[in-house]
Image: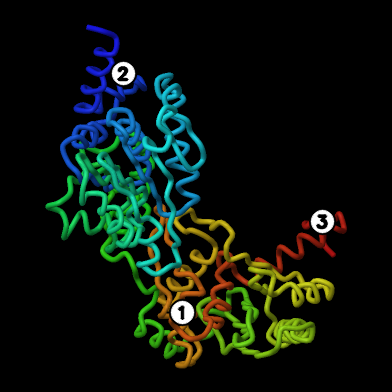
Amino acid sequence: MSLDDVARSVLRRWKAQPVDMVRELFHVEPDAWQLEALDAFPKVNRLAMKACKGPGKTAVLAWLIWNFLLTRPFPKVGATSISEDNLDNNLWPELAKWQHMSPLLTQAFSWTKTRIESREHPERWFCAARTWPRTADPQRQAQTLAGFHGEYCLYVLDESGSMPQAIMTTAEAVLASGLETKVLQAGNPEMLEGPLYRACTEDRALWHIVEITGDPEDPKRSPRISLEWANQEIAKWGRENPWVMVNVLGKFPPSSLNALLGVEEVMAAMHRHLDDSRFNWAQKRLGVDVARFGDDLTVLFPRQGRAAFRPKAMRHKRNSAASVDIATAVMKAKTTWGSEMEFIDATGGWAAGARDILVDSGYAIQEVQFAAPALDPRYENRRAEMWFNMATWVQEGGALPHLPEVVREFTTPTYTFRKGKFVLEPKDQIKARLGWSPNYADALATTFCMPEMPAAMLALARKAQELAREERSPLEHR
């Protein structure tokens, strides 16, 4: 038997048994669930991996892409993900990682940031990175991925748990013709719609589903998920918590796209009357949301503990006079009401003028960047975190001023999951559905930027700062 015959024999075996390729080419031993996926790949044309957070599903996608490229003649592979960044930072580097571990793959294929090609047949033997516009309508999304056909075709969808169904519709077009065509997807069960959800529910008969969990009580759990971490998250939030269900248990949550607050909850908060003793112990906070466009409002929303009070709304043109008006309104609120902390939405720089005036006047205003990382890792950013804190405040007894005209601002925004984190609907989408920007709700949300504190604590902190500046002991009598 010639060397070529031996090579062909090995490739035929690797095609039928991808696990052999992983063991012999990469010298790793797959986990039990990874063995299931590798074993199913040659036998089915639709394979889906429904996974908890961090079990190693991206590695399996990379192994199967390399298996298809290596063991089929003139294959075409298309790979996409929930975003271009995710593709650039996860799946594509994972492919490079495993290529570097194999002299065979390094010799046979070239790797670039958007394409992997056979060195001998670059135009007919490749894997191409494909992206789609998240803001486009379904037809445009599908069009950007269309036109992918051949005798041996594979379409790979990474993080499909958050993708629109239009992407899968395009991917499945490769199954229409060819000698061997497949669709492979993997993701977290974040949404009750889209490719992964449909594969696991109404289209279940068409798909081979590999379920991956980090559940400490499941003997088939992924060993890559820290048992200590999984137990801690379950103990902290409960097994029925949507975040735990998605990230730890690998299960679909009861609802993937929710309104943060219901109309009845907000109306109840607007009719709630609290005794002073329920809130007068807390810091007085003022939240400021500055108008971004001509039809938006600048809103100042006061809150003290469980009680939020009637806000002040201002409509003005975007000019230097507007900055003076906003700064003056904040100073007046601080003087007349006695606010102890003032929070201003500094996202996008719209509040820069008012902030500069306040700072120059000696006011220590707190800037809030909505896009900044959240303090709690369950949330995508500070905006999502603050809105969730505000919603919890309403649900747990917070009192809102009676403003029926702004109920929709609190009840229209929805949330979903992305990469295992709570994500609040983008403000532009909220504005499109509302017909106006949710300035009242955003202003109140900024007051939840920091944990609640008693009023006395801020006074004590300032006193300590004064003592430190004067280099005196806090125990000395005046």
- Marks 1/3: CA–CA distance: 37 Å
For the point 35% across and 32% down, which residue is it? 66
Residue that numbered label 3 is attached to = 468
Q: Can residue 80 be seen in this snapshot?
A: yes
The kind of secondary structure element at disc 3 is: helix
Q: Can residue 284 be seen in this snapshot?
A: no
Residue 63 disc label: none
The mark that comes first in sequence, 2 or 3, is 2
Number of numbered discs overlaid on the protein picture: 3
Type of amino acid at the residue the image marks with label 2? Glu
The kind of secondary structure element at disc 2 is: helix
In depth, the one of 177 and 23 nearer the eye is 177
Residue that numbered label 2 is attached to = 24
Type of amino acid at the residue the image marks with label 3? Ala
**Label 3 packing within 10 angstroms: few (<14), some (14-19), many (20+):** few
The mark that comes first in sequence, 2 or 1, is 2
From the viewer's perspective, is the residue at label 1 or at label 3 nearer? 1
Q: Is residue 16 above or below residue 116?
A: above
Is 380 placed left or right of 202 in the picture? right
Are the residues at dot 2 and dot 3 in contact (C-beta closer than 8 Å)?
no
Type of amino acid at the residue the image marks with label 1? Gly
Residue 398 disc label: 1
For the point 34% across and 20% down, which residue is it? 25
